Image: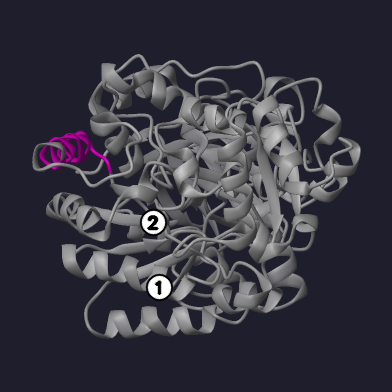
Amino acid sequence: MSMDVAIVGGRIVNGTGSPWFGGDIGIRNGKITRIGRLDRSKAATVIDAKGLVVCPGFIDAHSHTDMVLSLDPKTESTIRQGITTMVVGNCGFSLAPVTPAYKSLLERSLSQFLPRGTKIDLSWSTFDEYLKHQEKEGMASNTAHLVGHGTVRTAVMGHEARAPSVEELEDMKWHVEEAMEAGAVGMSSGLIYPPGMYAEAEELVELAKVVARYGGVYASHIRGEGQTLLKAVDEAIRIGEGAGIPVQISHHKAFGKASWGETAKTLKMMEDARNRGVDVTCDQYPYEAGMTSLATLLPPWAHEGGLEKLLERLRTLEDRRRIVRDIENGLPGWMSHAKECGWENIRVSSVGSEKNRNLEGKNLVEITKAKGASEVTMALLDLLLEEGGQATMVVFCMGEEDIRGVMRHPFQMVGTDSWAVAPTGIMSTGKPHPRFYGTYPRILGRYVRELGVLRLEDAIRRMTSFPAQRFGLQGRGFVAPGYWADIVVFDPETIMDKATYENPHQYPDGIKYVLVNGQVIIRGEENTGAFAGKVHRRT
């Protein structure tokens, strides 16, 4: 039988966790047809993988690239680290559903993910309309979609800090059901962001019950990752138990020195939950810093009503004083990043204005001095006001032992918690977290080859078949006949991330080829420009 592509002479790591084996892989019409010793003369394209590892394409369990796909369908920073499928719509943020009453509010909320000088235009209403739009647009990588609880709540009741009425909850259930009918793989929540932070567990249970009827997953950026970590993990487990749904704890970590070591307890909580029948797992990125919106430093009440209301409060002296007091003293159930980590460990990673461009990469103590302010909190509020509330930050807050402990645990899979960027052009703005470029090569280079935290085969299982199983991505995650030919070919001796916090816009070393649905996307330094990605719809 003729082949479109033959990958020959490589060490095949098939995604199951089994030891590598030598062999060739034949590909035809986008799928793997044969594994064994093949006649390369029958292949239109031959890839010589001698001395290289050949494995399934990496599946990013936690991506936000849906926010920028219309700007960057080539998804450079993701595809070049071997990611062939992205699970998007995380942390409660998805691009659908959209209602006329709150369309502008949702667009403003999502704009924090966009590069300078760009905007988002939500030209659809339902989740099905959104997925159809993406299918027409084309992209380099595959996507699987979660419906965001925050987006659903916004569509029905904006950013109001209250429980929904009976009618509003029914409307939210309808939107969730429509998304699941359209093919969403589950629902996400972001319980430190507006409007998700205003939802009680009972609301989430009721919506998750709808998702559970379709065999979906509940993925949560939990309500706290610092001193409230144990309570937040317990809440996520209780939601899963109450709804009868699998739980995915997003980017699991212990945030702030006071909480270092607590992941041993949270992992035990997950084990105990599984022993009583609650299906709970987690994902992780391998870095000591996190990244999110700079406005997350402000207390929950400041966000009520949306971005315009937030800016009004930043202009009002009485509200500013209250914000400062709450940041310095904390609030019950709210994690103050500044209090947990310290101002010197919070760096501004991107701003929108030319005026403040020189502040990117500086921490808030340095920014306070640069602005000539007397207090860090006032400098922060001034900066947020100048930037229209839209700037991002990198926060150094995690301990290495927690990172390794979570990574070793059998419940862990890998996610970047990033969106696609690039070293040049419109996607090159700011100083994004190095995880945007290096998550998967960092694990394979530092934690597998150099430190021996994981076996190579087990690390690849956590990057491929485990997330495929978790999110119901049939036909992906394994190197086996009949599976889609999403494949990465890399050098196990050289693979490594190069991106740093100071100079993040750098592609990793060691990735030789990336194929999506049988088409070569990355060939050495070259991006072929092929848009071979598909939208996965849960069936």
> Which stretch did the figure color magenta?
169-184
| Label 2: element kind | strand
Circle 2 residue = 220
Secondary structure character of the magenta stretch overall: helix
- Of 93 and 34, nearer the camera is 93
Figure check: 201 above or below 108: below
Q: Residue 278: name its quadrant.
A: bottom left
| Label 1: element kind | helix
Residue 361 horizontal/vertical position (percent) = 82, 42
**Can residue 483 be seen from the camera position used here?**
no
Residue 467 horizontal/vertical position (percent) = 41, 58
Give the residue drawn at x 44%, y 64%: 333
Figure check: 402 above or below 70: below
Name the quarter where the N terminus is drawn. top left
Circle 1 residue = 231
Name the quarter where the C terminus is drawn. top left
Give the residue drawn at x 62%, y 44%: 321
3D distance between C-alphas at marks 2 and 1: 14 Å
**Are circles 2 and 1 on residues that touch, CB within 8 Å?**
no
Mark 2 packing: few (<14 Cα in 10 Å), some, or many (20+)? many
**Can residue 170 be seen from the camera position used here?**
yes
Left or right, 209 with respect to 239, comes to: left
Amino acid found under the numbered disc labelled 2: Ser
Amino acid found under the numbered disc labelled 1: Lys
Residue 46 horizontal/vertical position (percent) = 61, 39
Give the residue drawn at x 38%, y 56%: 220
Task: Name which of mark 2 and mark 1 comes first in the sequence.
Answer: 2
